[in-house]
Image: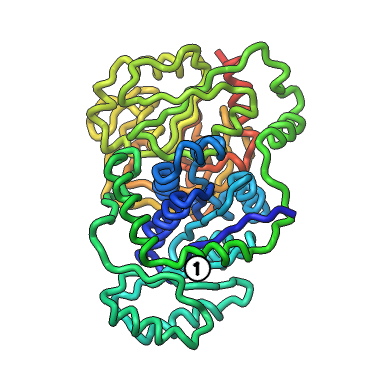
């Protein structure tokens, strides 16, 4: 049994202010000396970046040292990873913390389309047995707030809505009216925050602009959010509520154990002890490639690889000794001219692909490997053209690997997520990466030699064999 003080920060709907309130709470508690563990429900990559920055910018160097370094923002997605992995992944990420804060997704009860509560904030809160604090946009209501909070608190008896934070409050009089209305509701008011434009994060075609693109402004915003939360929230009451969460009986997820099982499940697979040297896996980062799950790096490391980050916007060569390449998601469409201008790196990536070394590219990585992006030359690994589109492609997918690739054996079934406003022609190669089976049937992506490139974001914790398979091919790449 493991006791982890924890809260889920939810809302009745998107746009209520979950991210700003959650980031403010994380910064405020970090300023008080607490080791805060940040988590996000769902597949979103951008919010966890703001969480991690809010904590690291507010924490002292002594705190970061005590925590073993800055904690990354981590995702808890019951669709991508399965409900059975939510508590173990949470315990892994929150190990040793003083307080874990979990930001919800969309409205409290909104989950995967057509699948009931699956992957909703309420579902994750129940899996974690965590108290829920509801962030309510109070800007256009007064007494009606009581009906709203009462409805959310009583809808599912297994979800413990234990507090409310009133956001976008207009004045002292408005706050008094809201508090009076909620007096008989049975859900205590744990905060009231005034409307302000000072700390809003800018948005564009896929949501908030990532932290990596506005580091200095984001640090200032985190400090301002912490000040707002200190002034408007009952931090002691929130901490007491978090400490009321019951112990969890699950065992923490362990990447080393996952790799051991993955290797045992594949006859002839190489274990860490079978390798004379650790293969170098280069992982793209920087402002153009900000989307990644922390567990991917942990799994690759557990599989025996030495993970080395690099920035395709700045670095003209791949890390020394690169034997495999991972290019995750991000915004290459915003930086297409700069990426194109780095011709030495584009050539190095193309040479690595031609050598037979494994390359795993998803979404932004797919675009970077194409022949061009919005007319700008890219790496040319794939004979495909990419461009921006007016259409948003968004949603969960079920897929099966059509052929053997660096990530999956033919027939491997996965769950993933698509999120982009770009298109690539053709949409699939002669050997597609995936066959999508739900909610629509089509082929997608490219399986070309040891290159696996696709729009589909997959969380490797749900298919840990992907990391061991990838690392094995780095040791002995197909030629």
Image quadrant where one finds the N terminus: bottom right
Residue 433 is situated, as x and y percent measured from the top left of the image, at 51, 35
- Picture quarter containing residue 254? top right
Compared to residue 417, the image places residue 371 above or below, namely above
The residue depicted at 62 percent of the width and 47 percent of the height is 89
Q: How many marks?
A: 1
Horizontal side of 73 relative to 301 (left or right) equals left
Q: Position of residue 153 (x, y in %)?
A: 53, 78
**Does dot 1 land on a helix, a strand or a loop?**
strand
Q: Nearer the viewer, residue 12 or 329?
A: 12
In this view, 251 is above or below 256: below
Q: Residue at x 48, y 60 (%)?
A: 104
Q: How has the structure been colored for display?
A: rainbow
Q: Residue placed at 47% from the left, 63% from the top?
A: 235
* Residue under label 1: 133
Residue 46 % position (x, y): 40, 47
The residue carrying pointer 1 sits among few (fewer than 14), some (14 to 19) or many (20 or more) residues within 10 Å by Cα, namely: many
Q: Residue 413: x, y in percent?
A: 62, 44
Decide if residue 45 is in sight here.
no
Height in image: 307 above or below 14?
above
Residue situated in front as seen by the camera: 476 or 384? 476
Q: Residue at x 40, y 86 (%)?
A: 180
Q: Is residue 198 left or right of residue 474?
A: left
Q: Is residue 50 in sight in this rendering?
A: yes
- Report the quarter where the C terminus lies: top right
């Amino acid at each position: 049994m493991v006791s982890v003080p924890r809260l889920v920060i939810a809302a009745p709907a998107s746009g209520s202010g979950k991210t700003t309130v959650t980031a403010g709470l994380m910064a405020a508690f970090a300023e008080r000396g607490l080791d805060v563990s940040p988590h996000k429900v769902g597949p979103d990559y951008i919010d966890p970046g703001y969480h991690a920055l809010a904590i690291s910018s507010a924490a002292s160097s002594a705190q970061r040292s005590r925590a073993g370094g800055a904690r990354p923002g981590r995702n808890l997605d019951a669709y991508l990873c399965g409900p059975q992995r939510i508590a173990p992944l949470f315990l892994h990420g929150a190990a040793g913390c003083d307080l874990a804060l979990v930001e919800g997704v969309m409205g409290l009860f909104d989950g995967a389309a057509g699948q009931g509560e699956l992957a909703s904030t309420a579902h994750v809160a129940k899996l974690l047995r965590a108290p829920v604090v509801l962030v309510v946009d109070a800007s256009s209501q007064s007494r009606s707030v009581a009906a709203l909070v009462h409805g959310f608190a009583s809808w599912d008896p297994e979800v413990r809505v234990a507090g409310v934070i009133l956001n976008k409050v207009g004045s002292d009089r408005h706050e008094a009216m809201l508090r009076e209305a909620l007096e008989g509701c049975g859900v205590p008011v744990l905060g009231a925050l005034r409307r302000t434009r000072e700390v809003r994060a800018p948005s564009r075609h896929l949501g908030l602009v990532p932290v990596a693109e506005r580091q200095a402004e984001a640090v200032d915003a985190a400090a301002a959010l912490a000040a707002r939360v200190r002034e408007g929230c009952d931090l002691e009451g929130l901490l007491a509520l978090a400490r009321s969460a019951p112990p969890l009986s699950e065992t923490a997820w362990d990447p080393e154990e996952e790799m051991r099982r993955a290797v045992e499940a594949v006859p002839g697979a190489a274990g860490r002890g079978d390798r004379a040297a650790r293969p170098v896996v280069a992982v793209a980062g920087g402002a153009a490639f900000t989307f990644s799950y922390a567990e991917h790096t942990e799994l690759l490391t557990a599989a025996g690889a030495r993970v080395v980050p690099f920035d395709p916007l700045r670095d003209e060569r791949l890390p020394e000794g690169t034997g495999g390449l991972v290019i995750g998601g991000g915004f290459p469409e915003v930086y297409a001219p700069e990426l194109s201008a780095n011709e030495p790196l584009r050539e190095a990536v193309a040479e690595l692909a031609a050598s037979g070394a494994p390359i795993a590219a998803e979404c932004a990585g797919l675009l970077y490997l194409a022949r061009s992006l919005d007319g700008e030359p890219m790496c040319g690994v794939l004979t495909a053209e990419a461009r921006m589109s007016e259409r948003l492609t968004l949603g969960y997918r079920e897929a099966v690997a059509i052929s053997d690739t660096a990530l999956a054996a033919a027939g491997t079934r996965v769950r993933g997520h698509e999120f982009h406003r770009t298109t690539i022609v053709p949409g699939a190669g002669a050997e597609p990466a995936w066959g999508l089976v739900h909610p629509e049937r089509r082929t997608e992506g490219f399986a070309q030699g040891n290159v696996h490139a696709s729009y589909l974001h997959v969380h490797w914790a749900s298919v840990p064999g992907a990391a061991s398979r990838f690392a094995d091919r780095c040791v002995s790449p197909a030629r």
